[in-house]
């Protein structure tokens, strides 16, 4: 006991003791013409303390014996310089850039967007507000390498390099969004871009910090619900906008204040809109009749979000708590139910058609989300910061038909992430523990996936070291993944002989299923600043992923996609599905990323090449069978018109590769032109065909022009024809969209106000999204005028 007490005391002393070698470093920040830079941010890398330069560019800050200063300023390239207790009168010259540099919170090591080894894009500030759409997918789809699943404008999730669903992690302040958008394309994401400070898109495997599922990438929505810096004054913002294409109105507001280390945050959003209008298109119904449409029915939205949080920020300790709620009703386009009326009269048939026409299927999304933060900046020579984030999310998605709840999807998630940032010799890094428990349930006639509990425990390590102009990064993660469920397997015997009708029976048995997987991931990468303002980055990563409950256990009719889905755990024999989850192997991805970047002066670019080799890739394959409510599974030949195709999750080897780029040129001080695009090729190996619903390639250009208080932007994006399709897909024609933005700055005393007008799809182009499950029924919106006003104080 005495020995344990002595060890505990020693550890506590190391963690809590201040460095005896702390010293004050002073210096000056200038530009490339030796002019002082005012309000440049200077902070000790890996720690919370920071200062701003004065009008002469001067600063003074306390550091440990061996530290690194991180200097940043808008429109300049960040600089990092090593300092010690003997450093004094430090002079730092910052290089101007036409690319905005933003600290990427998802990087975990305080890197900005230009220092990241993995490709990253960040939307923030006015750019985020101008491009914000009702869904996360539509907001981000213009970024290179990013597209949207598009189940109408009310439900659209990001697709990164051809990968979506569980392979793209959506987080809010680093914790899982914990909605059901990974289960079905008609389930909207619960992340709201209107309340975000910035949205970060990490391309390529990001499994080390965010879990084994993120082999495609991570979308991290950053907000200030838990303030991590002191707020000294009352500040706020308000915005109103109107969209003509759907007659929608949006109101958003934010307030923040603080006093003596205590800080408070509030934000809320209210959005309502009708069905959206489209260019004229045609739909062929089940009877072969062709109908002409100018809108997509059942795409209304009525949404309210409310978030508030508080925190205490001291010299070393930050403690905070936040609560957020979402209450959204939105229509589900293309959501059709099949009814059997074989013996009805013509009059009864007409009555049923009228009833079905009146049935509006819509979703009600409700979510309560609590988050907590404890962060302690340890003024110690080897431990820099200890950070604990916890979250609990109670999510519910109900599908309502004819005023009654048909199916409800629920997901309760508890998540904990503990990070210890440290410095060991010349290495700077982080070791962490990640825990997640997801309790998923589905109740109702469309519950195609059974209830399940998924639990993960993971340890991860991330280290970086600088060798002159080269920075090396190493990472590893080991994760214990466990899934538990009760599977009900039924055998249906049908005999239509009236004499034997009483002998029809349904036998069902419950199978308690539990399986554990150990997922191991590792990465190595480096970035070489081979000349000021230019770099090349190379990374190699290996990631392992276990199947989600939907991929493993699905067995039912999925109305949203118009298919009957079977999971990996089922075996089909004699047109009957039996649960036999044997020899299921993890999905294993090996990814190579090569990036070239230039970000100094008037001309800059980012070009990314990637190759992703995936063993045991999970995907849905048409079985050649159909499902009929009377006869169950049967051959598609001669089947009833109401029968739907049966798709089963398979695992086969696949490869994805491509390029994405973004280049800009500052023509004059007022004009800038950008060119961007991406191309992704995704197919099964051994010439077994293409992967389904891979987004079309795109190429675009943007012109920005400033006329004092007026900023103008014109964007044109061409989406190419997609004919790399599977046997059960149809090709999608190409189309071109032109968008324009105008923003005018108003001076209203203490209020910084902005009037804006956006015109989307100026030419009224008819465009279909190849990655959409309902592409033929839900084209993109037609010409839309969005006008509004926002103000800050």
Image (cartoon, rainbow, N blue to C red):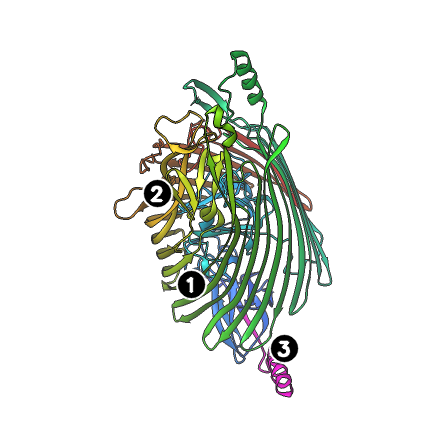
Q: Earlier in the sequence, mark 1 or mark 2?
A: 1
Q: Is residue 70 magenta?
A: no
Q: Nearer the viewer, residue 387 or 115?
A: 387
Residue under label 1? 520
Callout 1 crowding tier (Cα within 10 Å): few <14, some 14–19, many ≥20: many
Asked which quadrant contains residue 692, the reply is top left
Quadrant placement of the N terminus: bottom right
Q: Earlier in the sequence, mark 3 or mark 1?
A: 3
Single out the residue that lies furthest toward the front: 499
Q: Nearer the viewer, residue 221 or 62?
A: 221
Dot 1 falls on a residue whose secondary structure is: strand
Question: Decide: marks 1, 2 in contact (CB < 8 A)?
Answer: no
Q: Position of residue 277 (x, y in %)?
A: 52, 26
| Numbered badge on residue 16 | 3
Q: Residue at x 41, y 66 (%)?
A: 473
For the record, the magenta segment spans 1-27
Q: Is residue 104 visible?
A: no
Q: Earlier in the sequence, mark 2 or mark 3?
A: 3
Callout 2 crowding tier (Cα within 10 Å): few <14, some 14–19, many ≥20: many
Question: Decide: marks 2, 3 in contact (CB < 8 A)?
Answer: no
Residue under label 2? 691
């Amino acid at each position: 006991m005495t020995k344990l007490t002595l060890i505990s005391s020693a550890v506590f002393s190391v963690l809590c003791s201040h460095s005896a070698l702390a010293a004050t470093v002073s210096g000056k920040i200038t530009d490339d013409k030796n002019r002082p830079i005012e309000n440049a941010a200077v902070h000790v890398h890996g720690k919370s303390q920071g200062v701003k330069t004065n009008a002469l560019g001067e600063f003074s800050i306390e550091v440990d014996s061996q530290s690194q200063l991180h200097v940043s300023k808008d429109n300049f390239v960040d600089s990092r310089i090593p300092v010690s207790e003997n450093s004094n009168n430090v002079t730092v010259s910052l290089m101007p850039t036409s690319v905005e540099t933003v600290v990427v919170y998802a990087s975990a090591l305080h890197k900005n967007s230009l220092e990241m080894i993995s490709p990253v894009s960040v939307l923030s500030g006015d750019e985020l507000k101008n491009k914000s759409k009702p869904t996360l997918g539509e907001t981000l789809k213009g970024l290179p390498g990013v597209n949207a699943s598009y189940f109408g404008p009310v439900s659209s999730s990001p697709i990164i390099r051809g990968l979506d669903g569980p392979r793209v992690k959506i987080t809010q302040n680093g914790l899982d969004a914990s909605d059901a958008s990974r289960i079905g394309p008609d389930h909207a994401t619960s992340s709201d871009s209107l309340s975000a400070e910035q949205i970060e898109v990490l391309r390529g495997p990001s499994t080390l910090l965010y879990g084994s599922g993120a082999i495609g990438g991570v979308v991290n929505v950053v907000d200030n619900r838990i303030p991590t810096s002191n707020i000294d004054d009352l500040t706020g913002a308000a915005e109103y906008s109107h969209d003509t294409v759907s007659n929608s109105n949006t109101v958003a507001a934010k307030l923040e204040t603080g006093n003596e280390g205590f800080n408070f945050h509030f934000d809320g959003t209210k959005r309502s809109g009708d069905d959206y209008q489209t260019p004229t298109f045609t739909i062929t119904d089940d009877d072969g009749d062709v109908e002409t449409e100018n809108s997509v029915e059942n795409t209304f939205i009525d949404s309210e979000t409310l978030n508030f949080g508080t925190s205490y920020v001291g010299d070393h300790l930050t403690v905070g708590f936040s609560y957020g709620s979402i209450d959204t009703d939105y229509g589900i386009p293309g959501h059709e139910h099949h009814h059997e009326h074989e013996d009805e009269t013509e009059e009864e048939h007409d009555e049923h058609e009228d009833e079905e026409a009146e049935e509006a299927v819509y979703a009600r999304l409700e979510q309560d989300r609590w988050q907590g933060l404890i962060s302690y900046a340890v003024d110690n020579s080897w431990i820099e910061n200890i950070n604990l984030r916890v979250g609990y999310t109670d999510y519910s998605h109900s599908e309502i038909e004819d005023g009654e709840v048909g199916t409800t999807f629920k997901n309760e998630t508890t998540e904990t992430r503990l990070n210890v940032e440290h410095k060991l010799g010349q290495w700077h890094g982080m070791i962490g523990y990640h825990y997640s428990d997801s309790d998923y349930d589905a109740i109702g006639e469309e519950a195609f996936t059974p209830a399940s509990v998924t639990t993960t425990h993971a340890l991860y390590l991330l280290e970086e070291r600088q060798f002159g102009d080269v920075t090396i990064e190493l990472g590893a993660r080991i994760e214990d993944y466990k899934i538990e469920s009760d599977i009900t397997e039924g055998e249906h015997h049908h005999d239509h002989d009236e004499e034997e009708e009483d002998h029809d029976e349904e036998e069902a048995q419950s199978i308690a299923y539990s399986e554990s997987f150990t997922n191991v991931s590792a990465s190595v990468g480096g970035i070489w600043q081979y000349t000021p303002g230019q770099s090349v980055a190379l990374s190699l990563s290996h990631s392992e992923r276990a199947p989600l409950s939907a991929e493993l256990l699905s067995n039912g009719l999925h109305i949203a996609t118009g298919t009957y889905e079977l999971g990996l755990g089922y075996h089909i024999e004699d047109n009957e599905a039996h649960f036999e989850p044997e020899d299921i192997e993890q999905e294993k991805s090996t990814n190579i990323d090569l990036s070239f970047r230039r970000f100094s002066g008037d001309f800059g670019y980012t070009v990314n090449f990637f190759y992703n080799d995936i063993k045991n890739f999970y995907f849905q394959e048409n079985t050649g069978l159909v499902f009929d409510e009377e006869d169950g599974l049967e051959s598609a030949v001669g089947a009833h018109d109401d029968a739907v195709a049966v798709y089963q999750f398979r695992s086969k080897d696949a490869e994805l590769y491509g390029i994405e780029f973004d280049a800009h040129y500052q023509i004059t001080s007022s004009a800038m032109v950008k060119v961007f695009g991406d191309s992704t090729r995704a197919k099964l190996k051994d010439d077994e065909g293409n992967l389904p619903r891979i987004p079309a390639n795109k190429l675009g250009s943007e012109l920005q022009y400033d006329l004092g208080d007026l900023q103008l932007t014109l964007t044109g994006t061409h989406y190419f024809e997609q004919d790399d399709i599977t046997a059960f897909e149809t090709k999608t024609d190409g189309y071109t969209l032109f968008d324009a933005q105008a923003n005018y700055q108003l001076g209203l005393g203490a209020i910084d106000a902005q009037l804006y007008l956006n015109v989307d799809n100026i030419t009224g182009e008819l465009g279909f999204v190849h990655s959409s499950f309902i592409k033929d029924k839900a084209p993109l919106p037609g010409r839309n005028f969005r006008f509004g006003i926002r103000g800050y104080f």
